[in-house]
Image (cartoon, rainbow, N blue to C red):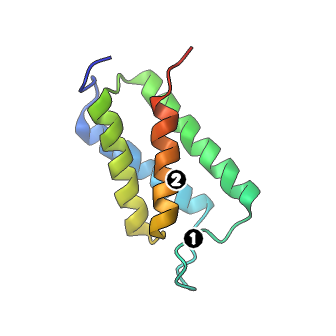
Amino acid sequence: MGLFGSVSAKQVDEFAQTLARELAKQCPPDVEQGAGRPNVTPKRLAAALEQVCGKALGFREQHDLGIYKKARLGNTFRWELKELGYAKDFIDDVTQRLVVFISRKIR
């Protein structure tokens, strides 16, 4: 695996934004209360995160994501969640989980 990977930066950005929007559809942020956290059950949140991570893994398997593209995916995902109104601590936690998940070695 190289540093840059074979997929374009634009494709990575579009995919990361799509992932964030899918998470927002399933677990919208509670912006009415100003919390910026999803107002859903932990089980539903876990299922939504599992689905998002699964799609990201599929994208990684389909495209050669180098170190920089993985970082770009994480950063774009983070910024899109912020635009959607999520709280900083939630964004940090979810983004870290996503990046760790797609960075694991496949056996």
Instruction: Tell me residue 48's x, y (percent).
Output: 64, 51
Total numbered labels: 2
What crowding class fits label 2: few (fewer than 14 Cα within 10 Å), some (14-19), or many (20 or more)? some
Q: Is the C terminus in the top left, top right, bottom left or bottom right quadrant?
A: top right
The residue that appears at 46% across and 22% down in the rendered structure is 61
Task: Report the side of 26 relative to 66 (left or right).
Answer: right
- Is label 1 in a helix, a strand or a loop? loop
Instruction: Tell me residue 22's x, y (percent).
Output: 53, 54
- Is label 2 in a helix, a strand or a loop? helix
If you read the primary sequence from the N terminus, does the residue marked by circle 2 or circle 1 appear first?
Answer: 1
Give the vertical position of 23 relative to 10 (above or below): below
Can you tell which mark lies on residue 37?
Answer: 1
Can you tell which mark lies on residue 94?
Answer: 2
The residue that appears at 27% across and 34% down in the rendered structure is 68
Which residue extends farthest bottom?
33
What crowding class fits label 1: few (fewer than 14 Cα within 10 Å), some (14-19), or many (20 or more)? some
Image quadrant where residue 43 sits? bottom right
Q: Is the N terminus in the top left, top right, bottom left or bottom right quadrant?
A: top left
Give the vertical position of 15 relative to 36 (above or below): above
Under mark 2, the amino acid is Val
* Alpha-carbon span between mark 2 and mark 1: 11 Å
Instruction: Tell me residue 58's x, y (percent).
Output: 51, 29
Q: Nearer the viewer, residue 12 or 70?
A: 70
Give the vertical position of 1 relative to 95 (above or below): above
The residue that appears at 73% across and 59% down in the rendered structure is 42
Can you tell which mark lies on residue 15?
Answer: none
